[in-house]
Image (cartoon, rainbow, N blue to C red):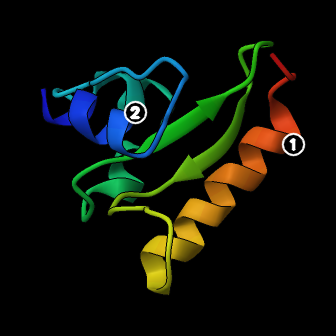
């Protein structure tokens, strides 16, 4: 429910998935690299290739670290996903 609300708040219009056991992250071989974070976000292109990784923490429009991470996400989406 929290993820759904945050996605709506920030206007995300793409599929989201949760992996509470981190099995997907481990399958990609990056689980140990992200153990200090509470989340990892992957942007996966239509070709199935991981195009961007956000290694935990929040991202939101605005300033500071959250704003920089948000801008990186927007840039990655614009670069790697086809227009709809």
Crowd class of label 2 (few under 14; some 14 to 19; many from 20; radius 10 Å): some
Are the residues tagged 2 and 1 within 8 Å (C-beta)? no
Q: Is residue 58 left or right of residue 53?
A: left
Image: 2 above or below 4: below
Image: 73 above or below 6: below
| Label 2 SS | helix
Residue visible at 51% across and 54% down in the picture:
54
Q: At which x and y percent is residue 74?
A: 68, 51
| Residue under pointer 1 | 79
Q: Nearer the viewer, residue 65 or 34?
A: 65
Q: CA distance from mark 2 to mark 1?
A: 23 Å
Image: 84 above or below 12: above
- Nearest to viewer (mark 2 / mark 1): 1
| Residue under pointer 2 | 25
Q: At which x and y percent is residue 15?
A: 49, 17
- Extreme left residue here? 1
Residue visible at 17% across and 26% down in the picture:
21
């Amino acid at each position: 429910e929290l993820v759904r609300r945050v996605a709506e708040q920030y206007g995300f219009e793409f599929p989201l998935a949760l992996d509470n056991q981190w099995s997907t992250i481990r399958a990609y071989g990056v689980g140990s690299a992200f153990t200090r974070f509470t989340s990892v976000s992957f942007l996966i292109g239509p070709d199935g290739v991981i195009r961007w990784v956000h290694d935990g923490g929040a991202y939101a429009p605005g300033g500071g670290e959250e704003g920089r991470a948000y801008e990186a996400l927007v840039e990655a989406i614009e670069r790697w996903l086809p227009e709809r």
